[in-house]
Image (cartoon, helix red, strand yellow):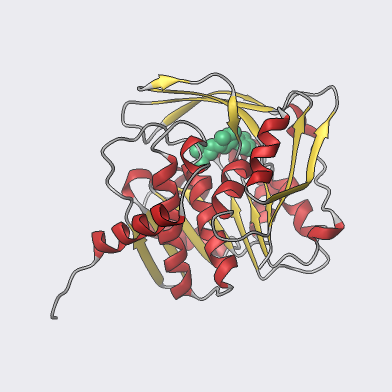
Amino acid sequence: MSLLVVGSVAFDAIETPFGKTDKIIGGAATYISLSSSYFTKKVNLVAVVGEDFPASDIQLLESHGVNTEGLQIKKGEKSFFWSGRYHNDMNTRDTLVTELNVLGTFDPIVPEAYQNCDYLMLGNLSPKVQSTVIGRLKKRPKLVVMDTMNFWMDIAMADLNETLTMVDVLSINDEEARQLSKEYSLVKAAKKIMEMGPKYLIIKKGEHGALLFHKNQVFFAPALPLEEVFDPTGAGDTFAGGFIGYLASTNDISFDNMKRAIIYGSAMASFCVEKFGTERIVNLSEKELRARVKQFVDLVQFEVTI
Ligand code: AMP
């Protein structure tokens, strides 16, 4: 099934206790597209970059089968730039720089060939742009998944509230869930957030896994205990790409299948953090992915008689 991905395509500069990168390819839609490309070959991208964005990075996306017809290149303008520094725990980070540049005036044009997409992934982006994309689709997709972050809660809460009423699944981290709901307990937070619009809520907890809420049901997926976490940037987006990519490839949006999708998303994210930026997720083999999913299954499988 076809998947439409909207989000930032960016330059990132990252600092972790293990090292530092100069401007490298990043952005929510980059990670989502690359990650979902391991599940479906019908990934259609809507995003914007400046003239400074290297053609080789666009080719990288295309080499994964990502359709870049909807990627606008703005002459004479600069690409979105984000810089972050991770703390020693690698679970928390400070944003050092957010330069919206082309994102500040982004008008998301949906090419005709992208209409009738079955799945829509709204990656981290201004909530106004996210809702504009939904409005520009002639047919509502079977499932709309959305990501957001504290940055948009701080500066565009009214728009965010509106966009939340239009989506099926929201995927955010624990800190963002607390900020959005003003509740410390994640169970209370989930209840409040699901009243704001999304019928499903994913709360990512970094190295402590992820929770999926729907009505009164809850599912937990661990994160794989890794010896080395090099760079968590993009892990959430890579997770989202695996999640929606798996759903699009199986075309089954039942709660049970969403549980499997959460495991596939977690497996993809576990690769992402092993190297800087997108390095680890540009060259994965089918065999590696299968072995990783098996590790997740083994991690939580046990027998008990109750
Ligand atoms: P994650 O680590 O999954 O939260 O995603 C990190 C990615 O999000 C980086 O590659 C950034 O380029 C991108 N990003 C950071 N801030 C924003 C923002 N305000 N809007 C859109 N994308 C962002």
Q: Is residue 73 visible?
A: yes
Q: Is residue 13 left or right of residue 160?
A: left
**Which of the two residues, 121 or 212, is positioned nearer the viewer here?**
121
Residue 24 % position (x, y): 58, 26
The residue most toward the left is: 305
**Which of the two residues, 124 or 24, is positioned nearer the viewer here?**
24
Q: What is the tally of numbered marks visible in this picture? A: 0
Seen in the picture, residue 266 relative to 175 is either above or below; the reply is: below
- Residue at 32% over, 61% down: 294
The residue most toward the bottom is: 306
Residue 48 % position (x, y): 76, 37
Q: Is residue 149 left or right of residue 289?
A: right
- Residue at 57% over, 54% down: 36
Residue 291 % position (x, y): 34, 57
The N terminus - image quarter: bottom right
The picture quadrant for ligand 1 comes to top right
Q: Is residue 151 visible?
A: no
The C terminus - image quarter: bottom left
Q: Is residue 146 left or right of residue 272?
A: right
- Residue at 74% over, 26% down: 101
- Residue at 60% over, 66% down: 248
**Which of the two residues, 141 or 111, is positioned nearer the viewer here?**
111
